[in-house]
């Protein structure tokens, strides 16, 4: 008979899928605030479509590439909104879990592995991006801005985009010495990507140097895929190339985030 030590008896057993337990923690908290989130998820696309698509679009007589400006703009807005939600959920919440409420330390003492803590929180970010993107898709569909049934493909695309931007942002937020660094992230990364990654105008109209910077951003690759899906046209780059590039960002971000989390949580 194998004897079990007192320490091993006192050690709580891990759930079969620990990352799901972490996800459940965030879903329980979200259950108290989801009403405000749902309201903003539907209000934001309505205001954006009316302001940019209908308002600004009225001055773009010829459209873009023979496509009505609203129809051309919507897929870019879906991708950029997904990116902003993903980064928003990966900045102050992550920093807070390390510096202020210290949720990660409590989870680590549960005990949960670093990979489970990271995967569970990333899964919640994916949930937030999926719900907000689905709402955006429904609203823009009601405006008649989706020209193809392939528009539903934008949902898996924005989920991959979410991983591509959220994973490295988790690493940055975990490393950041203070929340002022997060403001710098939005000022020098999120806003420029939103403005120059092909959301509001074609990247081809940029100077060559800025054009290649736009190509280097994960947002442009998601915008090109979403636009191809909603307009039922071929993307500017190959579909496998886009997906592999986004997957590379997600994998590199995951490895970096796991490394930073482990340094902070594992003594």
Image (spheres, rainbow, N blue to C red):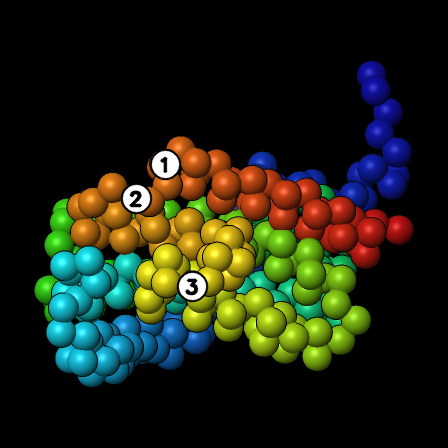
Looking at the picture, how far across and down is residue 160, in whole percent? Answer: 44, 47
Q: Is residue 265 above or below residue 57?
A: above
Q: Is residue 212 above or below residue 194?
A: above
Front residue of 136 and 199: 199
- The circle on residue 206 is 3
Q: Quadrant of residue 131?
A: bottom left
In contact (CB < 8 Å): disc 1 and disc 2:
yes
In contact (CB < 8 Å): disc 3 and disc 2:
no
Q: Is residue 256 left or right of residue 235?
A: right
Disc 2 crowd, CA 10 A, few/some/many (<14, 14-19, 20+): some
Residue at point 51% right, 61% down? 210
In front: label 3 or label 2: 3
Q: Is residue 138 left or right of residue 133?
A: left
Front residue of 211 and 147: 211
- The circle on residue 235 is 2
Does residue 130 appear in the picture of this structure? no
Real-space CA distance between mark 3 and mark 2, rounded to the nearest whole angstrom? 18 Å
């Amino acid at each position: 008979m194998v004897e079990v030590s007192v320490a091993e008896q006192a050690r709580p057993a891990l759930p079969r899928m620990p990352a799901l337990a972490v996800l459940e923690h965030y879903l329980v908290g979200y259950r108290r605030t989801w009403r405000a989130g749902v309201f903003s998820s539907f209000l934001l696309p309505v205001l954006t479509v009316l302001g940019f698509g209908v308002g600004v679009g009225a001055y773009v007589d010829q459209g873009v590439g023979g496509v009505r400006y609203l129809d051309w703009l919507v897929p870019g807005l879906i991708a950029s909104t997904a990116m902003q939600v993903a980064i928003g959920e990966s900045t102050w919440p992550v920093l807070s879990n390390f510096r202020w409420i210290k949720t990660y330390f409590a989870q680590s003492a549960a005990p949960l592995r670093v990979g489970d803590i990271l995967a569970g929180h990333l899964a919640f970010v994916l949930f937030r991006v999926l719900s907000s993107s689905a709402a955006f898709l429904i609203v823009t569909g009601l405006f008649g801005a989706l020209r193809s049934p392939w528009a539903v493909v934008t949902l898996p695309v924005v989920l991959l985009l979410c991983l591509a931007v959220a994973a490295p942002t988790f690493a940055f937020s975990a490393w950041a010495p203070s929340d002022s660094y997060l403001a710098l992230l939005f000022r020098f990364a999120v806003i420029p990507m939103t403005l120059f990654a092909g959301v509001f105008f074609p990247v081809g109209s940029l100077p060559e140097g800025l054009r290649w910077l736009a190509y280097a951003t994960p947002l442009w690759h998601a915008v090109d895929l979403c636009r191809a899906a909603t307009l039922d046209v071929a993307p500017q780059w190959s579909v496998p190339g886009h997906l592999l590039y986004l997957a590379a960002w997600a994998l590199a971000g995951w490895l970096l985030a796991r490394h930073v989390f482990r340094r902070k949580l594992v003594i």
